[in-house]
Amino acid sequence: MDIKHYMNEVGQRARKASRAMAKADTAAKNRALLLIAAAIRRDADALRAANRQDLDAARDNGLAPAMLDRLTLSDKAIATMAEGLEQIVALPDPIGEISNMKYRPTGIQVGQMRVPLGVIGIIYEARPNVTVDAAGLCIKSGNATILRGGSEAIHCNQALAKLVKEGLAGAGLPADAVQIVETTDRAAVGELITMPQYVDVIVPRGGKGLIERLMKESKVPMIKHLDGICHVYIDDKADIEKAVDIAFNAKCHRYGTCNTMETLLVARGIAPKVLPGLAKLYGAKDVELRADEEARKLLAGYPHLTAAGEEDWHTEYLAAILAVKIVAGIDEAIDHINTYSSQHTDAIVTEDYTRTMRFLREVDSASVMVNASTRFADGFEYGLGAEIGISNDKLHARGPVGLDGLTSLKYVVFGHGEIRE
Amino acid sequence: MDIKHYMNEVGQRARKASRAMAKADTAAKNRALLLIAAAIRRDADALRAANRQDLDAARDNGLAPAMLDRLTLSDKAIATMAEGLEQIVALPDPIGEISNMKYRPTGIQVGQMRVPLGVIGIIYEARPNVTVDAAGLCIKSGNATILRGGSEAIHCNQALAKLVKEGLAGAGLPADAVQIVETTDRAAVGELITMPQYVDVIVPRGGKGLIERLMKESKVPMIKHLDGICHVYIDDKADIEKAVDIAFNAKCHRYGTCNTMETLLVARGIAPKVLPGLAKLYGAKDVELRADEEARKLLAGYPHLTAAGEEDWHTEYLAAILAVKIVAGIDEAIDHINTYSSQHTDAIVTEDYTRTMRFLREVDSASVMVNASTRFADGFEYGLGAEIGISNDKLHARGPVGLDGLTSLKYVVFGHGEIRE
């Protein structure tokens, strides 16, 4: 197989399909989504069989248990995929919305129309549910998409893609609006990220290694985040109960997510009052605390206590480990965050109005929170309905990216024969 | 001079200054702009002297007359620079604006805050007025900026930068918020576009050659447009008088601008009625018409008539030349535009409602117009107040880019102690 030639053809078909998708009406897009949901329920047995093929091969290849777990398509996962599509149907269609039409002194009326980006390339790991979620969001937002899932899920992804194409065709939309890359050759990824003539944006969903490689090689803009080094700062004007609840939840609700707190900053004035209570909760979960010298004194006797080094402020543990630092107050907290944060999500716990306003304004992160757990940084929790990914970049979408992040605004001008004088 | 080391220091200073600019209040930013405007008026003589140094050197180096013209800082140009800053003062401060704060079922309230991008790198030709315009827009939008103007304007730019820094300092803002690159070595550009750790976005303002080179080498996202192949489509339901006015204005108001029409599409049904009238107007301006076979028959006798080839549909003439094509109707017009347009600005002239709506929705360009001259595609005409550039890209800003294009939206969350269950 000539990968370059194959991907070029995939790209051409996607570009062509994107033109039809851009003008598809809301009813057709919703009909496609409902047909796909119904087909997934109808063919659950066949999907499980395809998934078993993948799982058998993965076990033979010694795939790690956590990866096998993500690869597995349970009955519940199949039901959730179908429900997810129905939830996307319920979201308002973002495309074609016209806003801010204002008359100018020349007589023209100028505003903006929301339009699809065009072709979205999505690169993800061996998680079959992403195939359906991503396809659903791209269909609703009027985009064409090229999906490159982890090679371990190829049989399952092919079976799902067949159902997606069936739904598209049943609604009168081009089947090429959703294509999965049919080869597991890694060279296909290299082609996908270097054909800006066919692909308008790449959304990589995967580990840091994948994203770092794509950043080096991609010629297509990306919606991405590299890591989540999230902070909670407990101010000396914090409500102690809220502070303890939030700092415990932000670390221990789930360890492996990008919006999990990795560094806890505590104001010197309140540290003796909050750290002991927190230590009890963290201790019950065997969380390792990597603390600076001052915090270690306050945590003396904690069973999993180690010394934090410079490296810890830079680390996304994704584990039951937390870096802890005592700071003088809000100035030092903001400085620390703007130096070490990955600009994902950072929170302050305080009852002080002026410090709240300063933290919100001065912390340069995609999500900045007051008196809430960093775990809320999520498209569903923010009310976006669904999430294609999270962006830590500043251009285009920042933070959780929903349907709107797959669109752009073009200018529209209504005239009456006006010319420039 | 070690260019890499020098640019690295410029970048570090810019990043540091950007933190102070992000929290600067509206009054301080406006005060800086007014101080700079006053200093420019006060030091007009010194600015002209610096400009004479540049002009003498440029003449010795045989710079083309058009370039010398752009390089010249006339009394009027100096007054316009100062007035431009005062106009920026009058624009609302985009930074800190909070929008869409909505309560979620969990109790948190989620919305977005407009924040600066950080550090903007601007690369432009030997036009001293851009130095002041760009500095003004970056100051108002709370960004730091690194300006790399054409080397022919180095003395004038240095004199202007001194006044900008004086104004910043007078308002209590960091002088490093606006830095000009003090070397004319072209290697400085190579460094500027490859230090994403210090520069958040590059705005190149220059010819196609410059932008193509930057696109190949840049590691920093760009707000840019490569060219402007703009179309006017005269539908067979057009008002003939409007059609003639618009098609003449879109081509002949100015030849060298990116929003000038380069290809005229005319519906077969109306071509015999509009082309003769248009030919009279174009003839008076000696416009060369490069027409397809059918149009050539209708234009028989036109003194500057040549045959259009495939290449003409791809060409931005920036001159008194126009490609002309007869099309069957709106379908062929939209197909042609979506194939050959540079996605800058395209217009339809029609009185038909349904075709208007189709053209607006289906033409995939940054500006899509009905019954108006393409020459209106401009930040000032759109009411943005000023323009840092025009973007033909789909991510982030599309079309004319004003203050808002130098900003981004971060999420803000107001909580009351909420945690994820």
Image: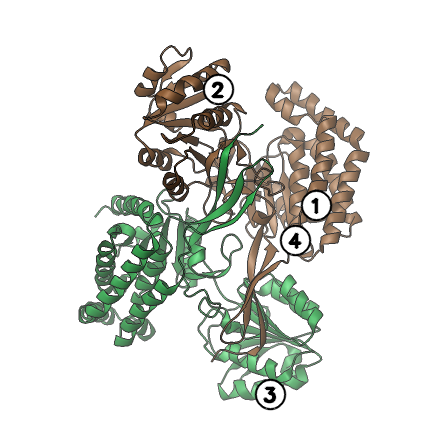
Chain colours: A brown, B green
> To which quarter of the image does residue A45 belong?
top right
C-alpha distance separating marks 2 and 1: 38 Å
Taking the spot 22% from the left edge, 56% from the top edge, the residue there is B170
Q: At numbered mark 2, what does the secondary structure look like: helix, strand or loop?
A: loop
x then y, percent, for residue B95: 41, 52
In the picture provided, is A238 more to the left or to the right than B344? left
Amino acid on which disc 4 is placed:
Ser
Disc 2 residue type? Ala
Looking at the rendered structure, whether the residues under marks 3 and 2 are on a common chain is answered as: no
Q: Amino acid at mark 3?
A: Gly
The answer to which of marks 1 and 4 sits earlier in the sequence is 4
Q: Are marks 1 and 4 in contact (CB under 8 Å)?
A: no
2 or 1: tag closer to the N-terminus: 1
Which circle, 4 or 2, is nearer the viewer? 2
User: Position of B255 compared to B190: left or right?
Assistant: right
Mark 3 vs mark 2, CA separation in Å: 78 Å
Looking at the rendered image, the disc whose residue lies closer to the viewer, 1 or 3, is 1
SS at mark 1 in the image: helix
The single residue placed furthest to the right in the displayed view is: A42
| Marks 3,4: beta carbons within 8 A | no
Chain ID at mark 4: A
Residue of label 3: B277
Q: Which type of secondary structure does the marked residue at label 3 adopt?
A: helix
Residue A90's tag is 1
Along the viewing direction, whichever of A94 and B61 lies nearer the viewer: A94
In the figure, residue A122 lies in which quadrant?
Answer: top right
- Residue B61 at x, y percent in the picture: 24, 68
